[in-house]
Amino acid sequence: MSSLVFYLLTVAIFFCIYSIYGWGLNLQFGLTGILNFTYITFVAIGAYFAGVAALQPGNGGIGGQYILGWHLPFPIPPIIGGIAAAILALLVGYVGLKRLRSDYLAIVTVSVGQIVWTLIGNITPLFNGWDGLAGVPQPFNSIFQLDFNHYQWIFLVICILFAVLGFWIIERLTHSPFGRVLRAIREDEDVAAALGKNVFRYKMMAFVIGSIYAGVGGALTIAYIGAFNPSGFTTMETFIIWAAMLVGGSGNNRGMILGAFIVPVLFNEGTRFLPSTPGNPLLAVSIRGMAIGLLLILAARYRPQGILPERKTIFRLDGLQQGGEVGGDRVVPQ
Amino acid sequence: MAIVSFPSSILKVTNLAKSFGGVKAINDVSFIVREGTVTGLIGPNGAGKSSVVNAISGFTQVDRGVVELAGHDITNQAPHRIAARGLIRSFQIARELQKLTVLENMMVAPFQQLGESPWRALISRRAVMREEREHLAAAVDWLQMFNLFPLRDEYAGNLSGGQKKLLELARALMAKPKVVLLDEPMAGVNPTLTKTLQGYISRLRDQGVTFLLIEHNLSVVEAICDHVVVLAEGAVLAEGQMNELRETEEVISAYLGG
Amino acid sequence: MEWNKRARRESCDVSLLLMGVGFGLITASVLAIASVGLTLQFGVTNFVNFAYGEFLTIGAYLAYFFSAVANLNIWLSMLLAALLTAGISWLINRVVIQPFLKRKAPLLILLVVTIGLSLFLENGVQAIAGPSFQQYVTAPGAIVNIGPMIFTAQQLVIVGIAIVLMTVVHLLLKYTRIGKAMRSMSDDPDLARISGVPIQRVTDLAWLISGFLAGLAGVVLAINVTSFTPALGSQFLFIIFAAVIVGGIGRPYGAMLGALLIGLVTEVSAMYIDSAYKTVVAFAILVIVLLFRPQGIFTSRGRV
């Protein structure tokens, strides 16, 4: 297989994974107006738990210190990853979503990101500390026994299946009464409460469901790369997803796909080939970080609604205009 | 506007008190709102009218006192619980859900919609759609009544000030409330529309909806309120019918004169 | 600091506690400077600046430039760095933040902008100065023993700076017209607007003071932790948040007390548990306060 095909497959796989990440963040921010500034932590938790669910029991020695080690077959680890991220979201949401302004949740998420990162790095028996997990088995490859190059195709198919399912679910939620309540909360929490909606509960649901997307996306990432360590979840990773959402269109799941293509794929891959300088090995990374930061500011300044803005909901009213015959107990003008 | 019989009270406020950082916003307020009436809440600026509305609807916690809605104690309950019990409020400055269309604003209002559960939204699509049709029918009726139907697909944020006020009232009614609390529904509304709104409120009252409304414009109050409560400095100064109150000396000095 | 650890092991319980208090006072001093800067700006503008941590980083690196490259005295470098950071903070408000406020951008967007700014600035520092550890060339000075508490002369200077700055802030808020204007904007923005407070001037000044305090806090933080990277400020940010929220967000005096509390508790706890987890203790306090007293523990009425 040519290296170009290999590269394109990798890009396609990450495109799918970033779309999944994006839909979750979009549900939280685009639809509900929840600020999660450490989305990547939920990705990481999903990745770690999926990783230890798929790995053989740890040997307790160097490189082999981690919990669980259940060696479960494929579709199960992503489910565990999703559940783990959901549980973290419940905890964070309980602290940050209750009766507070949106700044507070943002502060809590920033803090949680730092703490989880510190804890995972320092408590080695959890997920092998700063060295992270490695050798996570590839889904189904014990059956196929393919080399890494050919296995790419299998994994791409898995990712596409997940992405299609993820898109179907998120679209259905977005355009349901549930999604409508979330948007009402985004516009004005007090109005939603005055109309009998339990704002805390809905925000929590949006936060948890969005985090499940993060966790499942993380599970796919670790299944693909086979490894994960704390340096894989930096602030920058969170904001690549944010930038993708803002550029693509917050509140629009199709826009999110576009954003996942423009930002992580075109932009990130494009700057990957910046020459590295001997004096400053991270110069290219730094410049990429600056660019993402700038992109966020510019997107917020010039096109906060994104390339594909949220679509207007138009109800079909055929047969309803006459009024009167439906719900006869209601007041009708003379 | 004479009340034929004496209907029972649906909203009862007893000895309500609330202070903010030492300043007493509500001192000691008690009154009742009878079912099927329009009750006005008037008083000079700073009399505590909005504080009373916020306290009744659960948006501020009171220090003392009891609020009962149809016999249930709703004191200091969360706003959404009070709303679910059938008390819907509007806000002084119209607070439409800007990036939702007019029709969507209406569709948010009904309680406990099936599709508000994410799980049901995913798996019971048919039942959810059926329920949506029912709510749509009701929403269309209300919008037609308030002349907002042609604007149904417009973002609520694009409406004029008066249209927003109408939408807010229509949205409140969409929730099938027992009691509607209107915080200055006529403020910033042109005279013609004020007349129209007055007409709507009276007509709805005749259909059995109960209103408690804060209003500055006394001729509006006189025209539509069956009963009026006058607040001054966080306490009830007087109550009765508007034409009687106009003659009361205290009211004149506290409000009408000053 | 090797001697700290050795001393730690050798002391008995009470002196261990007091020693923790000693370290706590130093951390609290750094934290107080930083927290007051953040909370002052919040009080006036009513939104959290998530790029505030990077203001500290910028201060620390500017001082590094002045002291290590231009060979200036560290305290002079600190002053210059703080002044420059104040200017940068003012400029950022004018160039980046104000256009959003003029268009009445929603709070959510504003917060996203400050976090984008944080990413931009941290990586900017990293692009210029490199990712490796830096250290000021300074002598910690003579060791001063106050009971079982051990300070270096440098650390005492830090405590002194904090006390002076807190006094200045107090005098500013209490006795100057602009300070009173800041407080009134913080207490009731609408009322302040109506009663003719010069919003633009007060806002400018808030960003200047906030930047000055941040730059200075960055330098003393860098001195205190001895070596630092471009992540200096962003890693410290949530401890600042903890102090600010404990004291009630937007309230300078609360932030001072919050800093004292967080400083003392984290450093005393570090005497008994692995010091890698002292940030966890700060986090635990943050969580407890948010759960039970989100308006802050030193305020009767919050801004929540």
Image: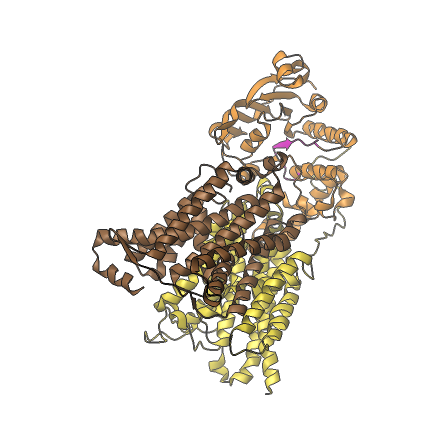
Chain colours: A yellow, B orange, C brown
Residue beneath the point at 49% across and 85% down: A145
Query: Of B191 and C52, which appears nearest the observer?
Result: C52
Q: Position of residue C56 (x, y in %)?
A: 48, 57
Query: Of C30 and B2, which appears nearest the observer?
Result: C30
Left or right of A27? Residue B198 is right
Q: Position of residue A198 (x, y in %)?
A: 54, 45
Q: Residue furthest bottom?
A: A1
Residue beneath the point at 38% across and 57% down: C280
How many marks do you count on the picture? 0
Question: Which corner quadrant holds the N terminus of chain A?
Answer: bottom right
Q: Position of residue A110 (x, y in %)?
A: 48, 57
- Quarter of image, res C134: bottom left
Residue bounds of the magenta highlight: B174-187
Query: Does residue A154 lie above or below C113 as drawn?
Result: below
Please tell me whether residue B72 belongs to the stretch shown in magenta.
Answer: no
Residue beneath the point at 33% across and 56% down: C153
Left or right of C298? Residue A324 is right
Please tell me whether residue B181 belongs to the stretch shown in magenta.
Answer: yes
Question: Which corner quadrant holds the C terminus of chain A?
Answer: top right
Q: Position of residue C277 (x, y in %)?
A: 35, 59
Query: Does residue B237 lie above or below A77 as drawn?
Result: above
Q: Is residue C237 visible?
A: no
Query: Of A178 and B254, which appears nearest the observer?
Result: B254
Query: Does residue A151 lie above or below B67 as drawn?
Result: below
Query: Of C244 and A25, which appears nearest the observer?
Result: C244
Left or right of C227? Residue A146 is right
Query: Does residue A86 lie above or below A321 as drawn?
Result: below
